Image (cartoon, rainbow, N blue to C red):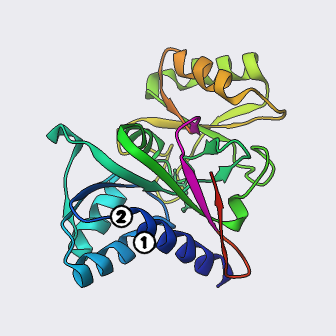
Amino acid sequence: KKVEEAKKLAAYAAVDYHVKDNQIVGIGSGSTIVHVVKRLAERVKKENLNVFCVPTSFQTRLLIQDIGLKVIDLNRHLEIDVAIDGADEVDSELNLIKGGGGCLTQEKIVASCAKSFIVIADYRKDSSALGEQWKKGIPVEVIPMAYVPVSRAIQSQFGGSADLRMAVSKAGPVVTDNGNFLLDWRFDQEHNWSAVNTTIKMMPGVVDTGLFINLAERVYFGMEDGTVKIRD
Ligand code: DER
């Protein structure tokens, strides 16, 4: 499938250009990074690399363990050399919407701890403004008891609608790896995303937002024609 091939292209480019021996590598979550884990395991085996991986979710922890890569956690006061992660959408200033997979909080922590944060995405995420292609809104992780006041605060301050993310294969709301709820804020106009991010982050009860501002250093887009487009 075209999209899957595009994800693979982006993932391989990022792993091949950015991962070196004796590094600590942050591994994001979602479907695109599955190709990162596969490629990384291939290179570790072929080149006998010494690499430790920092997971950003239960999903990624299991992926890393199952393929035989070495896991290490942030509590080992370590420096992450490079973090590689997917995105739901990328704009022209490298602002990201993330959290489609509900793992934004640990992803943002790892991305912020990394010397270099590299994003990989297929061509569907390649936008000039947020909201152009991604219509599921901006995820906001909230402490469960606060989801109503936070939802109201976002809506009254910025408009749109912030709805509790309900689970599909579980009764009730989605619960994150951190034991929290998620709101998906479907915005209806352009905003200054840095200001929005700061304001929402300050709302009592908010854990983090899916707006990744000034974090990504480079994005590799896997394109429909089999090429890789780089945006710095
Ligand atoms: O949930 C997340 O933050 C994921 O990284 C998401 O942004 C990208 O997921 P995908 O690679 O499955 O599109």
Front-lying residue, 96 or 59: 96
Q: Secondary structure at mark 2?
A: loop
The quadrant holding residue 214 is top right
The residue under the point 45% across, 23% down is: 145
Is there any visible trace of residue 26 in the rendered image? yes
The residue under the point 53% across, 15% down is: 202
Q: Are marks 1 and 2 in contact (CB under 8 Å)?
A: yes
- How crowded pointer 2 is (Cα within 10 Å; few <14, some 14-19, many 20+) is rated as many
The residue under the point 42% across, 43% down is: 111
Residue 186 image offset from top left, x and y in percent: 73, 38
- Distance of label 1 from label 2 (alpha carbons): 6 Å
Q: Amino acid at mark 1?
A: Asp
List the residue tagged with mark 1: 16
Q: Which range is magenta?
A: 211-221
Is there any visible trace of residue 110 in the rendered image? no
| Residue 98 magenta-highlighted | no
Front-lying residue, 1 or 176: 1
User: In this picture, is 29 found above or below 2?
Assistant: above
Q: Which mark is residue 19?
A: 2
User: In this picture, is 174 found above or below 196?
Assistant: below
Front-lying residue, 182 or 16: 16
Q: Is residue 81 left or right of residue 96?
A: left
The image quadrant where one finds ligand 1 is: bottom right
User: In this picture, is 93 found above or below 23?
Assistant: above
